[in-house]
Every structure is written in structure tokens, then in C-alpha cells.
Image (tube, helix red, strand yellow):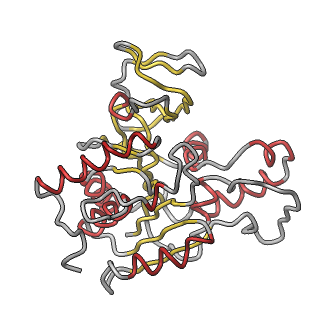
Amino acid sequence: MTLLLMAAGSGSRYGKLKQFDDLGPKGEFLMEFAMYDAIKNGFDHIVVITKKDNVAFLKEHLSKRLTENVQLDVLAQEIADLPTGATFTGERPKPWGTAHAVWTARNVIDQPFCVINADDFYGQSAYANAATFIKEYPQEDHYALVGYTLKDTLSEHGSVSRGVCKTNGDNLISVDERLKLAQEGEKVVDADSGMEYTGNELASMNFWICRPSIFEVIEKEFRAFLQDEHMIKTSELYIPKTIQNLLQEGKAKVKVLPSKDNWFGVTYASDREMAVKSLQQKTNEGQYISPLWQNQ
């Protein structure tokens, strides 16, 4: 099983590259806790998608921590990485999006894999549930999403964007992207759309369980995207949208796996203190050893 971490963001609201911030008790990156949890649950392949300038650093940093039986690939997400025969001659200041980040790994992944954000903490049960799902549902059209209670994913320091899930039992119907969610009294309100939520809804935090066949789907969408001049200038390719398209076309079934753990992330610089305290607390409680890789 493979864990793919998306670490190509610029951290504009955080003020620096949050993927490489030393949040752990011994200076560990947040992504290292994800790798640790995944490996404990049987994952044996780590893929990190990052910016070209960070590839050498991350490869050296992580290879010192992982054992030889865990394969490591660190790949650059680049604007010039296009489908064969496709062209792009304009200028673009940011990457093509999360679906393109996943597509970057098309040549190194040939088994079921999980996709996560490198700057989010998902909790140990998420990886255990993902591993169980992969073993119990080997079918190529079976995908899954680890869901978190919406009210537990908000920030005290500003609004956040979240994908609010609609479900039928444990089956995903859709993910509605809301861009400016914040707690207002007992409700969660999206300032952008005016939509109100109880806060008990499940939210997508971009923890997806995918199949290798998704690479062909992303490439097809990417080719169409590159033909649309408006999309090229204003939009991105998003992995939730790709999976939702598969769902709506009847080409995939998506289970929602509620997490038993709390999610946290570092969207804003002021979120850092909470993250540091939380990781220290989990270490004090024995969930993690310190330093994290002492037995590797």
C-alpha cells in the first residue's frame, strides 16, 4: 500500500512552508507523523509530491528516517509536466492543482494508495481504517474518503475552506466545496454562499483512498482542461472533483469512513501553537515515541 503526500503548497496564509515546520517534540515535520502512522498500518511505499526546489532536501531528510523496506519517492510537481502531445505556452504562477499533484505519481504507483495533505494531521485510526478498506475492497472501482466532523475542523483564527459531504448511509453522494466556513454561535456559516450547517456534518479533509486507474481519468480531464483558455487562467484540477465525477458517472463507489480521531492543520501561523501542543500531548500519552524514528 502507498501513501501519497501532497507537499507542493506555498503556505501563503501561514507565512512560510508549513510542510517543513518543526512542529514535533524533536523537530519532526507534521508529515512525518503521517508516514509513521501509515507504516505502522502496513504501508510500505511513501510518495511525496513537492516543488522542484525541495526535492533533494526532502529526499535526503526522509531517507535517513525510513527503513530499507519502505520505498521512498520524492517527485516534483511542475507546470511543464503535461500529457504526451499536449502543450502549454502561457504563464502560470501556481501548480495545476491537487489532481495534477496526484497524476505526478503515475509512473511510481501501481497499487491502491491514499492521498493526504502533508500539512494536516489525520490521526492514527484514519490509516488503520484505510488499510482495512483496501484489504476488504479490492475492486478497482471502490474508492473511499476518511471523513471528519465539520465543527472539529474549523480554525479559531479565521475562515477555512472545506468539502461538506452528503451521504446515504456510508456511501458518498457528493462533496460541496465551501470556501469561507466559520463558527457563528451554534452554527457553522459559509460567508461566501450564506449556507448554514449544524457542524455535525462530515467534512472532507482530502484523505482519499484511490486506485491506480485514476491516473488515466486525471489525464483525460487534464487534456480537456488544457483546451479551455478560461480554465487555464482561473482554475485548477482538484482530486475531489475528479472522484466526484467518477461517482456521478457511475464509474466508482465511494465509502465514507468516519474518523475516530480529531483532525488538525496549520492554515494560519497562529495555528502553530495548538499543533505543537497537540503533538507533544500525544507523545506524552504514548501514542508516539520521541524522537519519532529512534527505532528505525
Tell me residue 227's x, y (percent): 85, 52
Q: Quadrant of residue 70?
A: bottom left
Horizontal placement of 284 versus 204: left or right? left
Question: Is residue 182 at least partly visible in the picture?
Answer: yes
Q: Give whichever of 88, 282 is nearer the camera.
A: 282
Q: Given the current orientation, which residue lies at the most extreme top position? A: 185
Viewer-nearest residue: 39 or 118? 118
The image quadrant of residue 33 is bottom left
Q: Is residue 174 visible?
A: no
The residue that appears at 52% across and 53% down in the rendered structure is: 16
- Indicate left or right for 261 with 193 as reference: left
Q: Is the C terminus in the top left, top right, bottom left or bottom right quadrant? A: bottom left
- What is the quadrant of the N terminus in the image? bottom left
Residue occupying the far left of the picture:
285
Q: Residue furthest bottom?
A: 68
Q: Is residue 105 above or below residue 260?
A: below
- Nearest to the observer: residue 23 or residue 110: 23
The structure residue drawn at horizontal position 24% and vertical position 47%, both measured from the top left corner, is 278
Labels in figure, total = 0
Residue 49, above or below 259:
below
Q: Is residue 194 above or below residue 242?
A: above
Q: Is residue 106 left or right of residue 265?
A: right
Q: Position of residue 216 (x, y in %)?
A: 64, 63
Residue at image coords 45%, 62%: 20
The quarter holding residue 104 reads bottom right
Residue 182 place in picture, x, y as percent:
45, 24
Is the residue 160 above or below the residue 25 in the image?
above
Residue positioned 66% across, 50% down in the render: 237
Residue 69: x percent and y percent?
32, 84
